[in-house]
Amino acid sequence: MIQKIKGTMDILPDEAALFRHIEGIMREEAEKYGYGEIRTPTFENTELFVRGVGDTTDVVQKEMYTFVDRDEDRSISLRPEGTASVVRAIIENGKYSDPMPLKYYYIISCFRHEKPQAGRSREFFQFGTEAFGSDSPAADATAIALAASVLRRLGLTNVRLHINSIGCNDCRPAYREALVNYFEGHREELCDTCRTRLVKNPLRLLDCKSPICSAIADKAPRTVNHLCTACSDKFKLLLSALDEMGIEYEIDSRIVRGLDYYTGAVFEFIAEGIGAQSTVCGGGRYDGLVESLGGPALSGIGFGMGITRVILAMREAGLADLGRNTPELYIAPLGERAAIYALGAAERLRRAGKYVECDTVGRSLKAQMKYANKIGAKYTLIVGESELDAGLAQLRNMQDGTQTEVSLSDLTL
Ligand code: ATP
Ligand code: MG
């Protein structure tokens, strides 16, 4: 038997209904906040992600699904995230001459070769948004409000917003130095990965999940104490905007985000009680990205929300059971002619907008009644051949078991 690839999942109808429900809310909310849907290719030139995500990141160094295209000697990768592709698309389509801000959202699958576990898979699903062309904290607040609004509408009250600012090119170097000095003093205690990070990307040390590094990181210098006046003012404005918008947050100096392109405000929505993979949504500002991918100097703010993690949080809160979609009517024919009639009747009722099932297996009446019960049909219409000739049938209320004779000519439900 051929099995699915490790770290991928089959989404069966009940689960798919939950995905549709969640994705529907994501779409509705995004449109309300003025974001338009964008669809970009599933694979891109590898170079886009190397430059866009950053070549010091785990994503680019260890996790990308990269291959050489068949007929051209060119390296291609499945997208590990959505932002780089959207930036490429706005540059390639010349959208930067449109009125600002440009606001896009997408619901996509992403691919990362990570160790599969609860809330972490190799193909995963993400709702993402990007807004370009405003460096005002008002744009940050709007993006955060959209994410919060989706989570609120899904009923998730066990999710908290953690927020931080990691500064800009003016203030980050000094902060970086303060961090390196601090962690150098603990070099021997750090994990191997963090010792490499110390040289390559010291901010990422704050993100380490190992208990020892994490305890050291708790006492590390805080970005918010090293921000330049401009960054500090923007961060304060963002917090007052969130206050005004009624969005609760906690300032968390450990939030730095995993990808290289972030600047300024960064945030995560963290769910309680869903285990180690508790970040359901992460995002922030990436003011240098568009330019670094060959576009104009356009600032940007966005987030990615992991749909499977949202589902874990909904399960934990008892919100994931949507209930089944059940037929209004099941038509149970007896005999060949009645079976053909049943197909026609079911079709007419469906064209009138009803959810109707009828036998397609050739079951006995008893087995059909059992089946109708199992699928939760509200009514069953029993059509025998002699009744059919008389234009009559038996309509059974499956809840209370009562049965009435009905005329087939006024069968409208
Ligand atoms: P993590 O901290 O879990 O490694 P990340 O910082 O790598 O996340 P992003 O690249 O910002 O994540 O992606 C945005 C969101 O997508 C995450 O907050 C998470 O909800 C989800 N996500 C990321 N990687 C995976 C994965 N491998 N499986 C499932 N969901 C994921
Ligand atoms: Mg990750």
Image: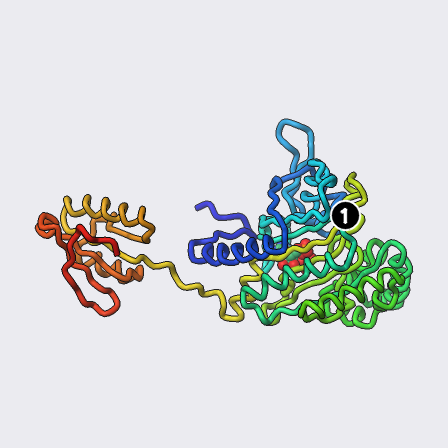
- Residue 38 is left or right of residue 350, and the answer is right
Q: Is residue 129 visible?
A: yes
Residue at 80% across, 55% down: 263
Picture coordinates of residue 170 (x, y %)? 90, 55
Residue at 42% across, 54% down: 13
Q: Is residue 115 visible?
A: no
Q: Which residue is mark 1?
A: 54
Picture coordinates of residue 229 (x, y %)? 89, 63
The residue lying furthest to the top in this view is 71
- Residue 184 is left or right of residue 35, and the answer is right
Residue in front for this viewpoint, 193 or 410: 410
Q: How is the image coloured?
A: rainbow
Residue at 58% across, 48% down: 108
Amino acid of disc 1:
Gly
Q: Could you say whether the residue bearing mark 1 is in a helix, strand or loop?
A: loop
Residue 154 against residue 100 in the figure, above or below: below
Q: How many marks?
A: 1
- Residue 252 is left or right of residue 381, and the answer is right
Residue at 37% across, 58% down: 325
Picture coordinates of residue 90 (x, y %)? 70, 40
Q: Quadrant of the C terminus?
A: bottom left
Residue in front for this viewpoint, 89 or 8: 89
When asked about the image quadrant of residue 84, the answer is top right
Is the CB atom of the residue marked by disc 1 within 8 angstroms of ligand 1's nearest atom?
no
Q: How many residues crowd mark 1 within 10 Å: few (<14), some (14–19), many (20+)?
A: some
